């Protein structure tokens, strides 16, 4: 088995949300809660979940843009953060690793400096990391712009002269210019018109193969995750509800929350009874005790509110954190068998 490129162990991130009633101590919201994951070289791993589930926080922790509250992060065999051992790499110590891990932002307009030419934007990292001086940087930046579908003759133009899709191509060229191994793509399509989303997705897909990139693809758009990702993790209130290959998660979702999320996508097994579950209520602002999903889950029982379900192995590489997944799976199988008669 290949060594993971990214390894997260018991990652937790709390954000302060104000002081207690008497002004002493602080209240915290737990955006990521005891989250563990391995991402392997060359794969695209999709993180899905509702807004506020902690997806982007995980990406930012890996990139060392925010400091986790506890846990451990390892990238390419090097520990970036380990609360237990008091390790947290400084900005200077992170510099060599930063080349290897890049980000594609959600909003291409906000992520490109409107005062700079697109050439300078792509060259900025090359110069900062002393990868190339002016002439070499110019050539490399032009090569990557063309690789991403932007003519190098437009080198001196500013971002404001480009469409949203073209700006995202420039953002991708900037990320690739440093020849990274790992890319966090944080909702890279959600600010784009539907008509250009598929073009950018196809571009990312071909670049992934061509440059042997590893992706953490964060999205709430399940169709793009299905198309782009090899494995999927389903996140609910900062915890992993289910993890598996894209095929397992799409065609055989076992956690009720995964079933809700993916029930809107037509299955490739039309003879199976579709799962339509009505969610109860809104996503809570603070995690409830026991199973975090129990306040909205139609299958909740007393046990669910009392104890936290731990991830159980449901198949090769397929894990589900639900007390009742076996029972619900058997019930669904019986219903499907009965509907066949
Ligand atoms: Fe629903 Fe209980 Fe499973 Fe949580 S543990 S998802 S509440 S059935």
Image (cartoon, grey):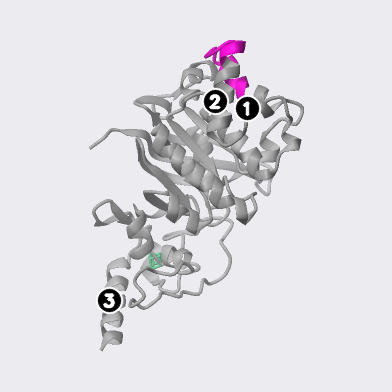
Tell me which residue sits at (50%, 74%) in the image.
278
Q: Quadrant of ligand 1?
A: bottom left
Task: Name which of mark 2 and mark 3 comes first in the sequence.
Answer: 2
Read off the residue under disc 2.
143
* Contact? badges 1 and 3 (CB < 8 Å): no
Tell me which residue sits at (43%, 24%) in the image.
86
* Contact? badges 2 and 1 (CB < 8 Å): yes
Q: What's drawn in magenta, residue-wise?
A: 122-136
Residue 311 location, x and y as percent? 32, 54
Cα separation, mark 2 vs mark 3, equals 53 Å
Q: Is residue 218 left or right of residue 231?
A: right
Q: Which circle, 1 or 3, is nearer the viewer?
A: 1
> Is 292 placed above or below 9 here?
below
Q: Which circle, 2 or 3, is nearer the viewer?
A: 2
Q: Secondary structure at mark 3?
A: helix
Read off the residue under disc 3.
333
Frontmost residue, 130 versus 11? 130
Q: Quadrant of residue 298?
A: bottom left
Q: Is residue 250 left or right of residue 168?
A: left
Can see residue 258?
A: yes
């Amino acid at each position: 088995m290949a060594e993971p490129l990214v390894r997260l162990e018991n990652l937790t991130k709390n954000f302060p949300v104000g002081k207690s009633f008497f002004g002493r101590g602080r209240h915290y919201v737990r955006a990521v809660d005891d989250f563990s994951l391995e991402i392997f070289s060359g794969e695209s791993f999709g993180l899905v979940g509702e807004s506020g589930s902690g997806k982007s926080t995980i990406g930012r922790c890996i990139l060392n843009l925010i400091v986790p509250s506890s846990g451990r992060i390892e990238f390419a065999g090097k520990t970036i953060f380990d609360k237990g051992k008091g390790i947290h790499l400084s900005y200077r110590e992170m510099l060599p690793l930063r080349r290897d891990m890049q980000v594609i932002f959600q909003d291409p307009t906000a992520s490109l400096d409107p005062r700079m030419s697109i050439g300078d934007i792509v060259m900025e990292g090359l110069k900062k990391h002393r990868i190339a001086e002016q002439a070499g940087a110019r050539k490399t930046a032009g090569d990557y712009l063309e690789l991403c579908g932007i003519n190098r003759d437009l080198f001196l133009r500013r971002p404001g002269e480009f469409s949203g899709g073209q700006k995202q191509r420039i953002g991708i060229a900037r990320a690739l210019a440093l020849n990274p191994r790992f890319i966090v793509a944080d909702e890279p399509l959600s600010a784009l018109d539907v008509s250009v989303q598929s073009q950018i997705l196809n571009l990312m897909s071909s670049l992934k193969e061509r440059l042997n990139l590893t992706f953490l693809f964060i999205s709430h758009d399940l169709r793009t995750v299905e198309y782009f990702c090899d494995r999927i993790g389903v996140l609910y209130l900062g915890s992993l509800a289910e993890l598996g290959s894209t095929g397992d998660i799409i065609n055989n979702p076992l956690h009720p929350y995964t079933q809700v999320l993916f029930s809107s996508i037509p299955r490739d097994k039309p003879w199976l009874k579709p799962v339509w579950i009505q969610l109860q209520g809104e996503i809570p602002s603070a995690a409830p005790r026991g199973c975090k999903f129990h306040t909205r889950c139609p299958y909740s029982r007393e046990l669910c509110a009392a104890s936290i379900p731990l991830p159980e192995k449901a198949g090769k590489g397929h894990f589900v954190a639900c007390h009742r997944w076996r029972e619900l799976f058997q019930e669904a199988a019986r219903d499907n068998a009965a509907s066949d008669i």
